[in-house]
Image (cartoon, rainbow, N blue to C red):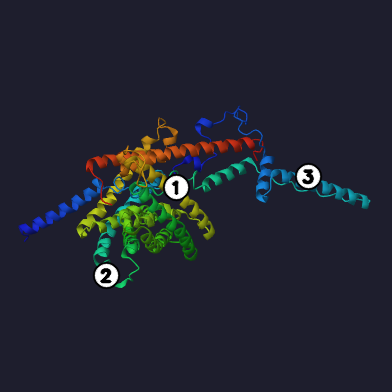
Amino acid sequence: MLTVSTDLTVFQSVAQFLSYAVLAVFAENVVFSRAMGVSRLIKLVGDPEVRTWQYCTPVILVQLFSAPLGWACMTYVAPLLPLYLPDWLPVASLRPILYLTCAVLAMAVVWVLLGILPAAHRVACREQLPLATCTCSVLGTLLLCSNQNYDLLQSTAFGLGSGLGYLFAVLVVDEGRRRLGSKDIPTIFRGLPSYLIYIGILSLAIYGLVGHGVAR
Amino acid sequence: MQNEQNRKPSKPTGRNVRKKNQPEHSQTVIIPQLSPEVLERARRAAAEGKTPQQIDEEAAAAAAQQAAQAAGEQAVQPKPQPQPKPQAKARKTRAEAEAELAQSIHDDHLWLNNPVMVRGLGLAPIVAMASDGDRALMLCVLSVLLLTATRMLAVAVCHITGNRFRPVVYAYAAAVLYIPVYIIMYNIFGTNLSIMGIYLPMMVVEPVIVKRMEATELETIGEAFRKGINNTIGLCIAILLVGCLRELLAYGTVFERSVLPVGLLPLAAQPAGGFLLLGLVAAGWTAVAGAYVRYKQEEVRHLYADRKH
């Protein structure tokens, strides 16, 4: 039988999870607030051969599964490293290789999980999986969770929210791409410049909503 | 690549489509004194390190000597054998010239195919972090130390692995090289390095560093070195340009030296301002580069108008 305190704890945890996920989707969106993964996003929306779900499904899953691994790495591995490393080798220099390993392990898990999809979707998602893993949005989220000292719940929620936020950004920019193809736009602004200005305006809206710059 | 005019330079745009009855020659005469022969002579002169006049003199002397030798042989031999005609050097066709121009545009990573302004790579650190000259300089040093070395190491490993697992190989090559690079940068910049936040370690998966992982064909190490250097220079130019411009607009300074009494656009220091400013700079850059590309295309079309095949 659940007690009131247990109910409150579960409720608080769910609320905290949702709040961190929503925070990552909108207020701290990886693209609009921190410009992470924007190069790949611009290439993705202009690529007719790769559909949004083919790339974003692996991104969301890798973000979700790499977040707990990143938290474990930050909590258990990173404190032990100074004991074994020589003085001339700072721990900070090993951060990319540590968190990249977390992302690659998550990629392996996701590769197995994608096996439950129908064959056509499975092959399409697995083709994009390595590129989705080695991207700024995944590694940047892991590094950010580490810098912010998020716990397991917060890290997982932020990872899931970052993946969903990336999907949100791709959908918004993809919708804008259709309108940015208008002939009314001057020739020199077509392509990359119009994308950047469009994303900049959306980023400005997020900045106005938050009211301050986000942590880096 | 977003810049369609660089990817397909020979494709006529709607504005430049030639009518069926319109003559091949354009009304605009750009350099009428240049002909393919003149260009070929200039190319040979440049290749041999001589002036065109010296090339002409040498050609005339060789022709005179050949004529004298032929006359002497004719006098000695009563029944001269017919001399084989010297093979005329194959001249480039228009298609070849256009292909060569397209390749030169593609290989120009400094201006015409800049990795940032034209291809849209490396946007995350530039937009989010290169908000002043000092940070831009740190990013430049990191790019110089990391980009070319990563490309060469990854290519070497890909030769061993048979070009499989490219994304992982490229990312790990950058992550391994990041260790000595971080130590070097820490010795140069000290604790100021911490202001870069997550964007310094994140560079190991930045597309401008590991973009080559998407290409299926395997390049040689020498080619990786050459292209890596070109990309590095192009990236550094873009980073420094945007960084200094943002600092000037946001704070009125350049490398912390006062230039303007007040910052004209404080928003330029934020990512939103970075996106907007980079978009405007990229538009200007694309306009100038596109005008130059159109000029070169027109020049090739003009010079090779009589050689369609």
The quadrant in which residue A76 appears is bottom left
- Circle 3 marks a residue in which chain? B
Q: Is residue B267 left or right of residue A13?
A: right
Measured in 3D between alpha carbons, the distance from the residue under mark 3 to the one under mark 1, in whole angstroms, is 47 Å
Measured in 3D between alpha carbons, the distance from the residue under mark 2 to the one under mark 3, in whole angstroms, is 79 Å
Q: Is residue B15 visible?
A: yes
Q: Position of residue B154 (x, y in %)?
A: 45, 61
Near-viewer residue (B155 or A90) = A90
Q: Which mark is residue B54?
A: none
- Circle 2 marks a residue in which chain? A
Q: Residue at x 51, y 57 (%)?
A: B225
Q: Which kind of residue does numbered mark 3 sit on?
A: Ala
Q: Is residue B129 left or right of residue B83?
A: left
Residue that mark 3 sits on: B60
Sequence-wise, which precedes: disc 3 or disc 1?
3
Q: Is residue B160 left or right of residue A91?
A: right
- Circle 1 marks a residue in which chain? B
Q: Position of residue A145 (x, y in %)?
A: 25, 57
Q: Position of residue B91 (x, y in %)?
A: 68, 44
Q: Is residue B283 above or below residue A125?
A: above
Q: Residue furthest right?
A: B78
Q: Residue at x 48, y 45 (%)?
A: B113
Q: Which mark is residue A80?
A: 2
Q: Is residue A215 left or right of residue B299?
A: left
Q: Which kind of residue does numbered mark 2 sit on?
A: Leu
Q: Which kind of residue does numbered mark 1 sit on?
A: Ile
Cβ atoms at labels 2 and 1 below 8 Å apart: no
Residue that mark 1 sits on: B237
Q: Residue at x 54, y 31 (%)?
A: B17
